[in-house]
Image (cartoon, rainbow, N blue to C red):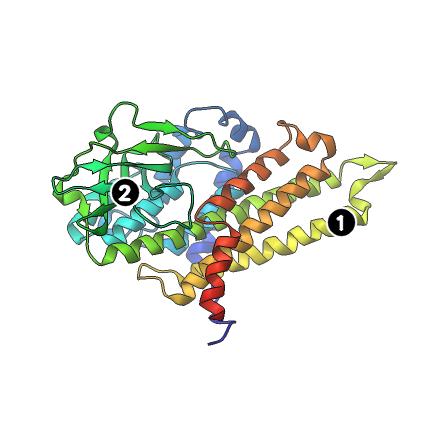
Amino acid sequence: MSVVGNTALSFTEEQAMLLDVARQFCRDKSPITRVREQLETATGFDGALWDEMVALGWTGIALPESCGGSGLGVATLVPVVEAMGRAMLGTPLISSALAGQLLLRAGNSEQCERLLPAIAAGTVATVALLDNADWGNESVALSLDGQGVLQGGKKYVPDAAVASLFVVSVRYQGEIALAVVRSEQLGAGALRPNTLIDQTKRSANVDFTGVTVDRDNIIAGSNVVAALRDIRLLGALLVAAEATGSAAACLDTIVDYLKTRKQFGKLIGSYQALKHPTVDILTATDSARSFVYHAATLVSDAVLDRDAEVACRMAKAQACQTLIYAGDRAVQFHGGMGFTYECDAQLYIRRAQWSQQQFGDAQHHRKRLAALLLD
């Protein structure tokens, strides 16, 4: 089997249009000053801005028309997320999109028609997957008994504080299943917010103990395991797209500083010791974008095949390593100021640390790529 594998890469008119619209929207609505205004807020984003994103149809881009969406597929969400990453715009869009994809891939037609229109219309949903902080551990401890009562909790549930709908992985009748839980079903004190290094993001540990799940909100069967695998890959892809956008913004910040800061009477951008790493960031960012859109070319509403898995894992490893390097260089190039909270380089290095951990770090994906490509 070839190590090179599938090299398909396409960029559709829909993706190009959405990228243009999303970039302009994010430039106008999410300048870095507004991002900083939201860092200390409870949600991390402006609710009015979220409503505008819903009005643009972004929450339904990847969902079928029969469920109130646009029917464009998950690949068309990638340029929107990249633009959001470039603007450091933190909203529940990725969380809601992944919850919608999980329901779409695992649920029956009745469940999809009942639950997905609300997500397309802007109801915030999220996926609760982690029983511990290790993305490499896919075991499920949260149980659902014969009476439909949950026992246990999940960790680092993204956007849990604003989510109205939780799609939760559970162990049910000896198999992996999904339970759909509404926020009003949670008990008092069920959410314990996490302190995250990236202040544009929010998550919480959620205790689901005692919640009763109606029979029609239990999703079981052979599709569930495959759907959960796909969601981990799609999550990796969307985080990679966001990280690629953030790396591009970080590069802009670096270049702007190199063109204005003088030392010993010369612009510091004239020194090769700073030029070369900056070019490395540029080429790595372009490489990450190629990996991301290669993966977007291969993913679809069907079960993801081997080529799509390889592409998603490559995109995640490349994009997050690129942002880590860019964030580190941004801090160092800004000198002592780069280590201060007021410097925008801090936003990017924090985003880099968060992105690296979501859906598995670079080492996590490269170990699995080795098995896929070399075994």
Is residue 73 at all visible to an observer of this figure? no
In this view of the protein, which residue sits in the foreground, 338 or 100? 338
Residue at point 57%, 50% (across, down): 321
* Viewer-side label of 2, 1: 2
Residue farthest to the right? 265
Q: Do the residues labelled 2 and 1 touch (CB within 8 Å)?
A: no
Q: Which of marks 2 and 1 is nearer the N terminus?
A: 2
The label on residue 275 is: 1
Residue at point 68%, 33% (across, down): 338
Tell me the element at label 2: strand
Q: Position of residue 83 (x, y in %)?
A: 50, 45
Is residue 192 at all visible to an observer of this figure? yes
Using residue 164 as the reference point, say whether residue 192 is left or right of it.
Answer: right
CA separation in Å, label 2 and label 1? 47 Å
Q: Quickly name the residue at label 2.
A: 168
Using residue 315 as the reference point, say whether residue 132 is left or right of it.
Answer: left
